[in-house]
Image (tube, helix red, strand yellow):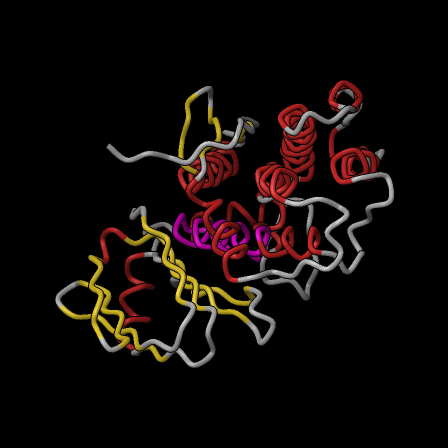
Amino acid sequence: MGYRNIKIEGNRKLHIENQQLVIESGTEVKIPLEDINSVLIENQAVTVSAYMLQKFADLGIALYVCNEKHLPNGVLLPMVRHSRHYKILKCQMEAGKPLQKRLWQQIIIQKIMNQSLCLEFSKKEGAGELRRMCREVQSGDKTHVEAKAASFYFRKLYGMNFTRGDDHIINAALNYGYAILRGMIARSIVCYGMEPSIGIFHRSELNSFNLADDVIEPFRPIVDLYVALKFDISQTECVLTPEIKRGLYGVVNYEMLIKGEKRILNNCIDSMVVSYSSALQEKCETLNLPELMRLQEHSYE
């Protein structure tokens, strides 16, 4: 899988030539397809070729598009790239409730643990209380510890008056970052033969990405940490500028820990998705879950 994440902001033409993505704007920029992990198209005046869409799908390159507010609202996903798609689909549909509840318990515990690390790394109080909450999470989180932890966590991280429903730069930045993560996770789910609408906990018939909304939970704190270090609750007049959005998109280049090893974010996502597929097929309860670390961009030697 590639390592470049490309953001297209201006009026450009995109097409494929000799296994390279060609970006036209007076002059041409050519990037080998094998180097590309994802492309974010923000400008609605950008034109693309059908062959480019085909090649992106063939190679599993995530292609994001944005709405008129310049927020990601769609992602191109490949269809049935896995050789055992039907087998894995059956495992998803036949997964028993006890297994699903125990897997969801693991996910929520790791999410809350990562939230506690986020408070530590941003030098905020409350990490110990969140670790205590981790011990209260039951199978299926039937006592809703996740919601209690989230309410406590966001007020500690961004201020006592902060709520996720506010029209504020912090929420706008969080939503932008989460949308990027969600698209990467959906891409990985499809590439590994699973149906993204069949979730573990999320079950909405109106949501085509229920499983992505499950898998994203322990990854959210990396966006939270980035936003906490870049913005302040007092910045009420600030808006998402192109520079801010480039920074948020760049979060995909940061690292997290998987089984104690530093890995770039998309590798961590793939590892968790593969472990979930294995858990379904082998009826086991082990997931490779990401652990938050201090923000560090992945370096390629």
Q: Residue at x 58, y 40 (%)?
A: 226
Side of 244 where 37 appears, left or right: left
Q: Residue at x 45, y 45 (%)?
A: 252
Q: Residue at x 73, y 22 (%)?
A: 127
Asked if residue 222 is positioned above or below residue 66 in the image, the reply reads above
Who is closer to the viewer here, 96 or 107? 107
Dividing the picture into quadrants, the one containing residue 20 is bottom left
Who is closer to the viewer here, 142 or 270? 270
Residue 258 location in percent, x, y? 46, 27
Q: Residue at x 40, y 48 (%)?
A: 192
Q: Is residue 45 magenta?
A: no
Q: Which residues are magenta?
A: 177-197
Residue 233 location in percent, x, y? 76, 46
Magenta stretch, overall SS: helix
Who is closer to the viewer here, 119 or 291? 119
Side of 289 where 136 appears, left or right: right
Asked if residue 284 is positioned above or below residue 36 in the image, the reply reads above
